[in-house]
Image: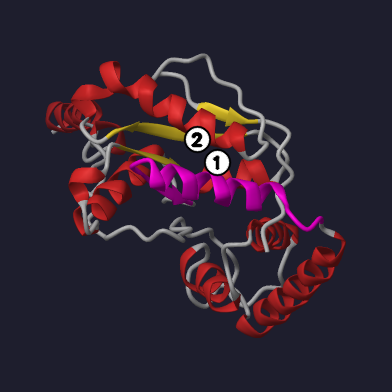
Amino acid sequence: MKLLNLLLIVCLVQSGCDSSQNQTDVTPPLTEKKRLLTAPVHKQKDAQMSLDAEVHKEMDWLVRSGFYDKTDLMRVFCEEMYAPGDLDETQVSAAIDARLAAHRGEQENWPTVTDCDRLDQAFERMEKRGLITIQNAGNTQTDGYEIFQVYLEEHPQPDTVIGYCFYHNQDLERAVGGLPLYLAFGPVDPQDEETKGVEIGNIVREELERVGLEVEWEGTFNDRLRVPGMVWQRR
């Protein structure tokens, strides 16, 4: 009996008996279609708790970005950024109303033409030169390129498109916070990046500088263009 018990103990120690250290975590593939305005990561909160500093900080930059209205913001905070039911919707609604009103008040002191207006003008000029331009395109460069491909498929004259220029949500957040705005660019066909990528980059640089925005760029496809010193004021 003692020998049997000893053998059982040795077996348990060696096998780990379903120990988590012997298991491999498997992440299911992402199949949900991406949206342009999205904040997909749920943050854990105690149910119906008061809005804390983190919520107000996120709300502040999203409002100042100029891309989100009341409906967008309610969806972001009550369905996407936080799980449904985690935040009190009445409190969220009141906080959004207050921040939107403050943002409208700030606009009274803005110049007639802002840096964001100049950026819009530059993007419009790029479109006339054959680029598809996208602002706030997903959350990553991969998102942005996938969205570009969708726009290309829907373009009325796809043969006239020679490339793209976009910035994504993380680029936007940094720019709203006072850091340089980073822009991704490239030709339609990724196989042409080394031969035509610089050509597209020069179009982007020329149009940004034409409207009065400063550009930093090393002149290669592997270096993203940057717009430093940009004051983010989007109505």
Give the label on residue 26, or none. none
Give the label on residue 171, or none. 1
Quadrant of the drawing holding the N terminus = top left
Contact between labelled residues 1 and 2, with CB atoms less than 8 Å apart:
yes
At label 2, the amino acid type is Leu
Q: Secondary structure at mark 1?
A: helix
Residue at 81% from the left image edge and 55% from the top image edge: 111
Residue at 32% from the left image edge and 42% from the top image edge: 145
Give the label on residue 183, or none. 2
- Is residue 49 shown to the viewer in this render? yes
Q: Read off the magenta span.
A: 111-135
Q: Is residue 131 magenta?
A: yes
Mark closer to the chain start, 2 or 1: 1
Q: Is residue 10 left or right of residue 204?
A: left
Decide: few, some or many residues near mark 2? Use Cα within 10 Å; few <14, some 14-19, many ≥20: many
Q: Is residue 143 magenta?
A: no
Mark 2 against mark 1, which lies toward the viewer?
2
Decide: few, some or many residues near mark 1? Use Cα within 10 Å; few <14, some 14-19, many ≥20: many
177 or 155, nearer to the observer: 155
Distance of label 2 from label 1 (alpha carbons): 8 Å
At label 1, the amino acid type is Asp
221 or 79, nearer to the observer: 221
Q: Secondary structure at mark 2?
A: strand
Quadrant of the rendered image containing residue 62: bottom right
